[in-house]
Structures are given as C-alpha cells and as structure tokens.
Amino acid sequence: MRGFFHGQRNPPACRGTSSVVPALSALEGCRFSHMQKSIAVVLGLALALVVTGCSGPKGDKGDKGDKGENGAAGSPGTPGPQGPQGLAGKDGVSPPPQFRVVRSTSENGMAKEAMCAVDEAMVSATCMSKLGSANQAAKTIGDNGATCEAQSGQADAPTAVILCAKR
C-alpha cells in the first residue's frame, strides 16, 4: 500500500496558491465548481457589508427643533362609577362643635361671670383685657364658670373667656 497521501486525487488540505481571494485558496484544489465559489464570495461580501453597516459611529441626530403648539382639548369623558353607599345614620350633617366659647359681660363697670350651661363643663378659662392681653388668671366658680376682677390701676375689669364642653 502506498503512503496515505500518495496517489489521491485531492490532497488533504486541498491546497492551492493561485487564487486571488485568500479565503478561497484552500478550496482551489478541492471539488468545488466555479459557480459554488462565486456564491461563496457573494455571500461573504454580503455578510461583511451587513456587519460593517450595523457597527461604527452613527451620524449626528440634529437639533430637536421648536416645540409645537398644544392641540385642542378633547371631549370630556364619561362620568365615573357611583361611589359606595355611606354609613347608616350619616346624613352629611356636621357634628356639633367640640367647644363653645362664652364671654362674660359687664354692667356699670362690674364684670359678670361667664357660665357654662348645666349640661356643660368648663374646660379652660382666661381673662382678656380691653387691650387684648391675657396676663391675668381667671377665678373659677365651681366647674362651670369663671370671673375676672379688676386689678389696681385698671378702670374696667377684664372679660372672662371660657371654653365649655358637653358632659
């Protein structure tokens, strides 16, 4: 038996050196037709163009331009669904105020006491002078009233102001 490479039609590497395209020089001595080689060249060039077209720097995007004017408002949408039913017994009436303010009155220069109603209790008491200062503590009368007395040098007694809350 002769050597492994002797007498064979196509040498193992199918070497050829006369090709213009180096990638095809390995195919020169092999059994490929001219048409198959041409198709291989065309496909290789097409693939190279696609790859180079997808990479590399992109061109300048340019200026964005001025913003256009707003368009006309659209038609109003349909009203939303009905809300859930309110709690039983709640008819939308505001609750009564938490506190009631009561001021004392004065007759003939004498201050009368400020009193809460029978079903109320006094929460806070203060004395207000005619100038608006609150620098005197009120004298309480039980748990539902207060009065203020004139200090020396004051012509009029300050007004007693109390906060009353329901019991």
Image (spheres, helix red, strand yellow):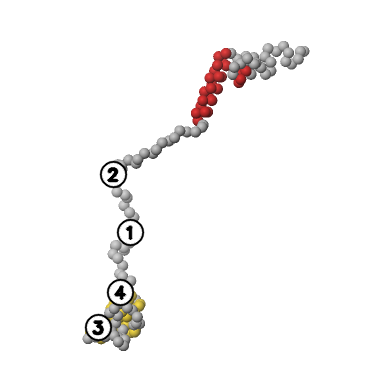
Q: Disc 3 marks which residue?
A: 106
How far is disc 3 from disc 1 in space, using C-alphas? 48 Å
As helix, strand or loop, the secondary structure at mark 3 comes to strand
- Quarter holding the C terminus is bottom left
What's the residue type where badge 1 is placed?
Gly
How far is disc 4 from disc 1 in space, using C-alphas? 29 Å
CA neighbours of label 4 inside 10 A, class few (<14), some (14 to 19), many (20+)? some
Q: Disc 4 marks which residue?
A: 100
As helix, strand or loop, the secondary structure at mark 4 comes to strand
As helix, strand or loop, the secondary structure at mark 1 comes to loop
What's the residue type where badge 3 is placed?
Ser
| Residue 116 quadrant | bottom left
x then y, percent, for residue 109: 24, 85
| Mark nearer the N terminus (1 vs 2) | 2
From what the image shows, is residue 41 above or below residue 95?
A: above
From what the image shows, is residue 51 above or below residue 145?
A: above
Which residue is farthest bottom? 152
Task: Write the residue at 31% across / 86% down.
Answer: 151
x then y, percent, for residue 96: 30, 69
